[in-house]
Amino acid sequence: MTDTIAHSDTSLATTEDLGQLAQRHLVMSFTAGSVYTDAPPPIMVRGRGSLLWDDQGKEYIDALAGLFCVNVGYSFGDEIGDAVREQMAELPYYTNWGAAHPPAVKLAAKIAELAPPGLDRVYFTSGGGESNEAAIKLIRQYHQAQGEHSRIKFISRRVAYHGTSYAALSLNGMTNLRKQFEPLMYGSRHVSNSKRYKRRADETEQQFTELLLNEIETLIVQEGPDTVAGIFLEPLQNAGGSLVPPAGYHEGVREICDRHGILLVADEVICGFGRLGEWFGSTRFNVRPDIITFAKGVSSAHIPLGGMITTSRILDAVNNGPDGMYLHGLTFGGHPAACAAGLANIAVMEREDVLGNVKRNEEYFRAQLETLLDQALVGDVRGLGYHYSLELVTDKSRCTWSAETSANDFVYSILQPALLDAGILCRAAVDHEGTPLMQFSPPLVFSRNDIDTLVGRVRRVLDELAARVS
């Protein structure tokens, strides 16, 4: 008799042992090692509207739209799924390498219609990191086609997140995510982000804008303008906690790029497709980028899909250059089923007036969150649209966390478990300055009742934890 090896029989798995199967077999993204040995992770099994339920029947309000991506919520899976099923029955796959198919063509045309003027050429990927990789390569090729071979450096902001693949990780301004994998792509440089909290009280918004722009200009001059290829910015920066740009900032960056021949990229992986009440955050802030990268909300995460939007001027220069083509390819870029999901998702967003919902409720959302400023631990509320953050402090006058309980212990041992227990799914983290953050970026169908429910639950959690921390 041959030796046998025991394997988990997933066909017989019950809801009671799915957590244990996950611990043994599923490698989860950015998940603490203790999750694989201590209590099993939550197993989400059902969603409706902005609510989720786990395998134990516990209800959660999803205040992070999955991962900033389920923009239409959880009630349109049947409709978007029907579009995917019909496409799979007709043409389940074909490549966009030297060929096209109807869903990719139609979605590219629709995105060009929604994008800011002049951005009319669309390249599809499977996610945000891939989109930023694609943009980096396009920019490098563009400058080479112009005969500017020294332009190989890229500027992004400190604490910004642009992905985890090689070049995208190089753009990241999050030291804790990139230092383990250095050396990364040569020529990545970082400047200050637009966080205003904790700056001196007498600094005007204009002064802050001038400070940020002068830093970018000085770095470009220091590096040599003819060596800088591109600047990557999120219209509203996610990492660091909903960092809103000061007035005139994006217009100033655009002027600097034009003057020095640098291409400007708006990373709209989170801001795109309604998060800030416009199809693209670039429209809200008058960014006027040369390239937009997107993902997440384009399909409301029903199927992985992302992409890059650029101008005919840039793409034509590359196609007419010495290589005769854009030298990039992805097997699943522009997948027919994914593009069908994207088209169906946009149709739902238009029919349900999802962007209008964000615009109508934006001020209410912010006002309700600002009522939490009376909490002992809430130092700042910031954000726009459906993207907000609370910065938690123990000393409001100094804007610092100085409790006996460290920020890390508070967030990961106290705050996160308390939020889950209260049925709140949001981002709780420690920022680069050692301060706890709570981040809310819910589905764009979030109603005022949903906002009230969320803020009420958050208040109860903060009431309880303030006493524990003090």
Image: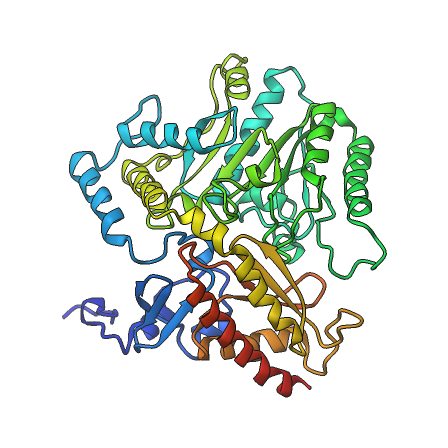
Residue 76: x %, y % from top left: 28, 53
- Would residue 401 be seen by someone viewing this image from the given angle? yes
In which quadrant of the rendered view does residue 247 lie? top right
Q: Residue at x 34, y 48 (%)?
A: 352
Label tally = 0
The foreground one among 446 and 138 is 446
Task: Say above or below: 113 vs 419.
Answer: above
**Would you place residue 129 above or below residue 30 in this image?**
above
| Residue 438 visible somewhere in the drawing | no
Horizontally, residue 294 falls left or right of residue 286, namely left
Image side of residue 175 versus residue 322, left or right: right
The front one of 115 and 153 is: 115
- Residue 215 in the image: above or below residue 316: below
The quadrant of the image that shows the N terminus is bottom left
Give the residue at the far right of this rendering: 202
Quarter of the figure that contains the C terminus: bottom right
Q: How is the image coloured?
A: rainbow
Q: Residue at x 68, y 68 (%)?
A: 435
Could you tell me which residue is drawn at 73 percent across and 30 percent down? 256
Quarter of image, res 373: bottom right
Q: Position of residue 199 (x, y in %)?
A: 80, 58
Q: Residue furthest left?
A: 1
x and y, in percent, of residue 339 in the image: 32, 37
Residue 237, above or below 104: below
Residue 72 lies, in percent from the top left, at 37, 52
Residue occupying image coordinates x 58% and y 46%: 169
Query: Nearest the camera: 143 or 117?
Result: 117
